[in-house]
Amino acid sequence: MFCALPARRLITTCVCLKTAHKLGIVEALNINDIKGLFRQSSSAELALPDLAPIDWGILDYLGWIHPSGSTAFVVMPVEDELRSLRLRRVLNAGARPRTRMCSWCHHVYRSRGTALFSVYVSGSDGRRSIGNHICRNLDCSLRIRNLASDPPTYLPETLHIESKIRRLENSVLTFMSRANVLA
C-alpha cells in the first residue's frame, strides 16, 4: 500500500531534520581520523581506500566497500564531528532483475544497481536490524551531480542540484538517526 504525504508536510519534515543537525563540509580526512571512528576494527577489516585521489569538494559523505563485498563503511560530518556507520551489504544477484531506486539519492536503476545495506540496531537482544536499498558502490554524491558514468538514470528528474544535495543529506541523516548513530 502506498501512502503519500502532502508536499508541504514532506518539505517541512526534511527542513526540520536539516536544522536539527548542522551538517559539516566533508573536508579531507586522514587515515587516523577514520581509524578513530572504527576503533574495534583492524586496518585489514577496514580496507581503507586510497584517500589521495579523492575530490573532497563533491562528497556529501565518504563511503567505501570492503574488498570482500559484504561490508561497507560510511563517514559523514554532523555538527562538527565525524559520525560513522558499518553496514552489511547484500547484492541482488540471485533475484530476477527489476527496477529499483536508491533510498538515499533516488537514482533509478533498470536492474542490479542497488544493494541492500543494513545495520544492527541495539534492542531486542541485538537481533533487530534496519536496511535500505542504496547505490551498490555508495556513489550517491556522484550520481546526484551526474558525475557517475554508468548507467544513466532510468527516470531523470528536474530537481536543482542544491535540493538533491539536501535530500541526500537528509536521507543519510535519517538512516543514521534510525541506527542510533546520532544519539
Image (cartoon, rainbow, N blue to C red):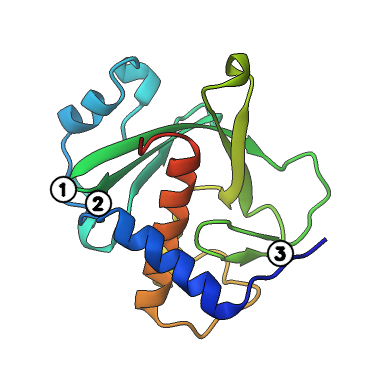
Residue 150 visible in the picture: yes
The residue to which callout 3 is attached is: 110
Crowding near the residue tagged with mark 1, few <14, some 14–19, many ≥20 C-alpha atoms within 10 Å:
few
In the foreground, 14 or 72 = 14
**Amino acid type assigned to the residue bearing label 2 in the image:** Ile
What residue is shown at x 65% (from left), y 73% (from top)?
A: 154
Displayed quadrant of residue 142: bottom left
| Whole-number angstrom distance, CA of label 2 to CA of label 1 | 8 Å
What residue is shown at x 46% (from left), y 50% (from top)?
A: 174
Of mark 3 and mark 2, the one earlier in the sequence is 2
Horizontal and vertical percent position of residue 82: 24, 40
The residue to which callout 2 is attached is: 54
In the foreground, 150 or 109 = 109
Of mark 2 and mark 1, the one earlier in the sequence is 1
Crowding near the residue tagged with mark 3, few <14, some 14–19, many ≥20 C-alpha atoms within 10 Å:
some
| Whole-number angstrom distance, CA of label 3 to CA of label 2 | 28 Å
What residue is shown at x 47% (from left), y 82% (from top)?
A: 159
Residue 141 visible in the picture: no
> Contact (CB < 8 A) between labels 2 and 1?
yes
The residue to which callout 1 is attached is: 28
